Amino acid sequence: MNNIIKIAKWELFRYIRSKAFIITLIIPFIVIIIAGVPQYLAINSEQPVMNIGIIDKGNNLFGEIEKQVSNDSEGKGKDQFILQHYTGVENNENSFIKELIKSNIADIVVVLETQLIDSGNVKFYHRNNIGIEQVSKVEQIIFNVVKNQRIENLQLNKDDLEYVRKNLDTQLYEISEQGEMEEMDMFVKYVIPGIFMFVLLLGILTSSQLLVTSVIEERSNRIIEILLSSVNTKELMAGKILGIGLLGIIQISFYLIIIIILGIFGSSYLPIELNISQLFSFKILWYLLFFILGYFMYSTIYVSLGSLFNNERDAQQTIGFFSLFAIIPMYFISFIMTNPESIITKILTLIPPITPFFMIIHIGMLSAPWYYSLGMAFYLILWIIGITFIASRIFKTAILMYGKRPTFPELFRWIRSSK
């Protein structure tokens, strides 16, 4: 046992100081920045003032459109559009519109067809370098004016109008099988399980490379022979798996600490309210359990894979195949949420490499009962024991073999005959 702990500590401190682990820690923040910065720039960037030509064919809506644009500009503190009103151009409408845009007099020309309130028929003409987002903003302004006019035609007063437009104040509650009622928090229900799934996926993809590279390097440099002079293969394999497993726990703990800090000190700066008591409910223990089980299972597979190859190039294809199992659940999240009781969902949940991911979804997003979660945890543990048994026999035989790569019949023979 002392040897296993020593190897685990050596592997842990070796990886935790590596650039790969540091990059892995900051990747989620990079992803958030990459996703958030374009949105921030799109919302807060200075938009150029655009000239909008309005050709109104007898609807008398130009004044209302001006009011709508003025109201929108007051909310944003700046003018976005300069309106130009044109009438009496029906005889040469197309050539007139072309000249407006060609001469840069107007960036967008809107034609309000006759009886617009009833027909809703509007035509938009714009220069080819105008973005669809700008056209959509003008379209929304016209729609708001038409909508208001239709409501007025129905002889609704201002109070009636506000009554029609009043939004719903929605509160969501969940009732458990025991009859307990609690208010549902969308962040806790969907984002937290998503974080665990993403970190587990990231950890698996990272650990696969670290473990396989580590074993291949130690074999190539004959360091493995020196290690095996002091410890046996089971201790060596167990130490490597334990070390990389602890690395995964440190990784998820780091993100949980960040969430706690945001929940305590950063709520006022975030668009959502983080409730620490809800964030760290009993479900968090289930997330951690299946995170750890998934991490250890994949670590066991990758340690045995590393012993089968002499160089990283040969190992990459096999690593990619097993890593594919970790990516598959991401594509099935929507299906599971809409079909939690389907036979496909149940079958996929029973596939061991996918089970940890699907159980995090079941527990967090679908509120799986505790007895189902406990049963699946034991199911996964049994598979991990079986995978460890097979992997240890392969690792024991292959770790000191050089040159020829073993075939599948040879692997089956090692599993059956190794002592």
Image (cartoon, helix red, strand yellow):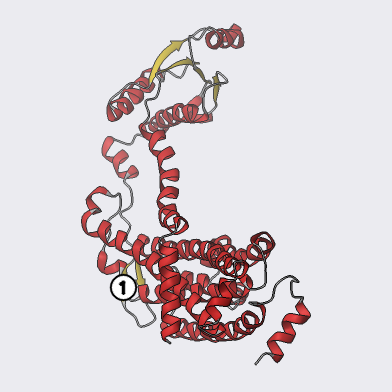
Closer to the camera in the image, 264 or 367: 264
Q: Quadrant of residue 155?
A: top left
Residue 263 spot, x, y in % from top left: 26, 59
- The residue under the point 39% across, 24% down is 47
Compared to residue 173, the image places residue 95 above or below, namely above
Answer yes or no: is residue 185 visible: no
Task: Give the secondary structure at mark 1.
Answer: loop
- Taking depth in this image into account, of 343 and 232 the one nearest to the observer is 232
| Location of residue 300 by image quarter | bottom right
- Residue located 66% across and 63% down the image: 311
Residue 272: x percent and y percent? Answer: 30, 53
**In the image shown, does 75 or 119 lie closer to the viewer?**
75
Q: Residues within 10 Å of mark 1 (few under 14, many from 20)?
A: few
In the figure, is residue 375 to the left or right of 167?
A: right
Q: Which residue is mark 1?
A: 281
- Kind of residue sitting beneath label 1: Ser
- Residue 360 point in image, percent of width and height: 46, 71
- Image quadrant holding the N terminus, namely bottom left
